[in-house]
Amino acid sequence: MGDDGDEHGAGGGGEPDEGRPLLRVERRGPVTRLILDSPHNRNALSARLLSEFAAALEDIGSDPAIRLVVVTGVGTTFCSGADLGERRSAGPGISAHTALPEVLRRIVRLPQPVLARVNGHVRAGGMGLVAACDLAVAPASATFAFSEVRVGVAPAIIAVPALRVMSRRAFARYSLTGETFSAHEARAAGLLTATVDDAELDRWVEGVTASFLLSSPDAITVTKKLFEVVWEQDWDQAMDSATALSSEAFGSADAAEGIGAFLEKRPPVWVKRP
């Protein structure tokens, strides 16, 4: 799947630079950017890139000073899916296929919110990255496809996050046909939070970032836990878990500060993180 939005899987297209990371980590105060930087295969999910991704997420999860994670890519392709060339040469079981589930799991369970800044086209496994993030924004020029069926495989792993954000009917259509669809269609299907004009992408990200930084870090972490509770438990279990999480949130130092600030009509000062 290339910059021109073709329909099939990634791989090929040159040799990687073995001397540098395929995932760039950029820290900007409380915001960390994870940048897919593997242009030789249009940011395909190779085993090495996913290993770097998992390690970065582990470090971020243990750093409470980080308030927001932004995932994006270089070039005009956000992610072209699995590196099929690598998978074919490596043989069964030795590829991104076994590493992708862990990365998706870490994104979903990260204490901090994760925003996908979709810089361009998305295919196959890249769709799972977008779906796993808490928010996702894309320019109107981006295109999307669950292209697995076009190369004889199934979007099995990425169906887990995708079916939690997309309507079943939309996922069925796009995953069974493998057709390419627009950013506006991705928004209507639930895959994206927003679609913006290409020139407005960074402005949108900056606005949402500012909103996140006004919110309590503890409350955000608890709120993210609610997503799993509601997804994975039946009504009674979910209500019990949500009640416990509510008590946890109301008993936090951030809650005391936030409620006090509201009653005193002043901006809250959240507890400083190391």
Image (tube, rainbow, N blue to C red):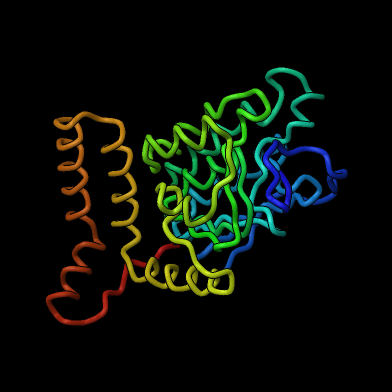
Q: Nearer the viewer, residue 139 or 36?
A: 139
Q: Residue furthest top?
A: 92
Quarter assignment of residue 216: bottom left
Residue 213 image offset from top left, x and y in percent: 39, 69
| Quadrant of the drawing holding the N terminus | top right
Question: Which residue: 47% across, 60% down?
Answer: 68
Q: Nearer the viewer, residue 195 or 56?
A: 195
Q: Nearer the viewer, residue 179 or 241?
A: 179
| Quadrant of the drawing holding the C terminus | bottom left
> Where is 244 relative to 101, above or below?
below
Residue 143 image offset from top left, x and y in percent: 59, 52
- Position of 267 compared to 82: left or right? left
What is the total number of numbered labels drawn onto the structure image?
0
Question: Which residue: 26% across, 79% down?
Answer: 267
Residue 157 image offset from top left, x and y in percent: 52, 29
> Where is 216 relative to 159, above or below?
below
- Position of 197 compared to 64: left or right? right
Question: Which residue: 21% across, 45% down?
Answer: 245
Question: Which residue: 57% across, 47% down?
Answer: 144
Residue 5 image offset from top left, x and y in percent: 68, 49
